[in-house]
Image (cartoon, rainbow, N blue to C red):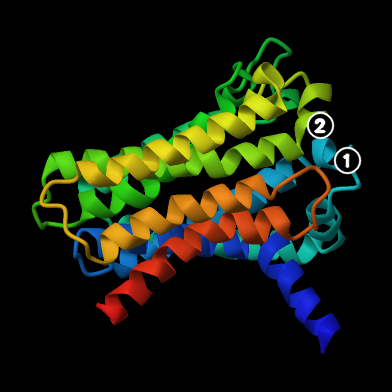
Amino acid sequence: MKKIIYKSLDFLLFGNVFVAVCAVVQALVTYSFFGLKPDSKVCGFLFFSTFAYYNFCLLINKTKASLYPQRDRNNWFFAHRNLNLTLTIIAGFATVPFFLALNYWPKVLVLFLGFLSATYNFPQHWMYSRFINLRNIKGLKLFLIAFVWVLSVVLLPVLQTSIFIPQREITLLIIKQFLLFVAVTIPFDVRDFMEDNASNLKTVPIIWGIKNAYCFSITLLLINLLLVFCFKNLTFNSNFFASVFTPLLAVFVILSSGLRKSKYYYFLYLDGILVVQYLLLVVFNILK
C-alpha cells in the first residue's frame, strides 16, 4: 500500500499534475476573493496549458536536465518518457477548445503569456550561440515566473467575467499574489543554486547569496501581509483570515527549507501553499 501511495505521489508531483492543479486552485482563489462563480473554461484552460507547458519544457530541455541525474523529478520523468510525452500531447490538444471558448481579451492575454513563456524557456542550442532567452537575463528568472503566474490566475479570470470589479482591488490582489509567488519560488532557486551557478544563470540567490535571498523572501511575505489592510471596505471575513494565515504559513515553510530536504518537500509543501490558501478560504467560509 505504501509503495502505491509513493508511486501515485511521484506521478502527481513529478508528472506536473499537482502544479497544474495549483494553477486551477489559484484561479479559484481569485473567484472566491471577488465573489465570482468559477468559470470552467478558464479552469480547464489553466489546468491543461500548465500541465502541457511544464512537461514540454522538460522534454525539450532533456539534455540540460540529464546533466543532474540526482534530481528525482528528472529521473522519474525520463524513466516514464513515453507516458509523459503521450499525456503532454493529449493535454496540448485539450487546451485548444478551452482557448477558443475564451473571450477576446483573455485570448490576447493568453497569447502574450504564451510568448513570454516560450522566450523564457526556449532551448539555446536550437538557435545561434548569440541567442539569449529571458531566463538568462540577470535576476529576471523568478520575477518572470511570478509575473506569468499572477496574470494567468488573477487577471485571466477577471478579464473573462462580465461582472464589474474595482480596478484598485484587482491591482492589490495582483500585487499580493505576485509577492507570494516570488517568495515561494525563491527556495526553488536556492535548491538549484549549484546547477544554476554551473550554467552561469544569475538567479537571486547567486547574485545576493542564499541568506539574503531567504531574507528577501520573508520580506516579500511581510509586505504581502501588510497589503491585506489596504483593501477597501476591509472586514474580518474569510478573505481577511486566509490572506493573513497564508503568508504566515509560507514564512514557516520557507524558514524550514534547506538544501537537504525530502524529494517531496519543494513540489508538495512549497507548491502546496498555493492550495492551502484556497482551503483556508473554504474553511473560514464554513466557520463564519
What residue did someone put label 1 on?
68
Measured from the top left, where is residue 215 in percent x and y? 58, 31
Q: Is residue 35 above or below residue 7?
A: above
- Res. 15 in view: no
Quarter-wise, where is residue 188 in the image? top right
Look at the picture and state if 189 lies above or below 87: above
Residue drawn 10% across the image and 57% down it: 163
| Residue 84, horizontal then vertical, whole percent | 72, 62
Question: Residue, x 32% and y 61% (percent of image)?
Answer: 241
Look at label 1 and name its amino acid. Tyr
For numbered disc 1, what is the local secondary structure?
loop
**Crowding at label 2, few (<14), some or many (≥20) Cα neighbours within 10 Å?**
some
Q: Quadrant of the N terminus?
A: bottom right
Which residue is rendered at x = 63% and y = 17% of the image?
132
Q: Earlier in the sequence, mark 1 or mark 2?
A: 1
**Is residue 77 shown to the viewer in this render?**
yes
Identify the residue at the far top of this view.
130
The quadrant where residue 57 appears: top right
The residue carrying mark 2 is 195
Marks 1/2: CA–CA distance: 8 Å
Q: Secondary structure at mark 2?
A: helix
CB-based contact (under 8 Å), mark 1 and mark 2: yes
Q: Which image quarter holds the C terminus?
A: bottom left
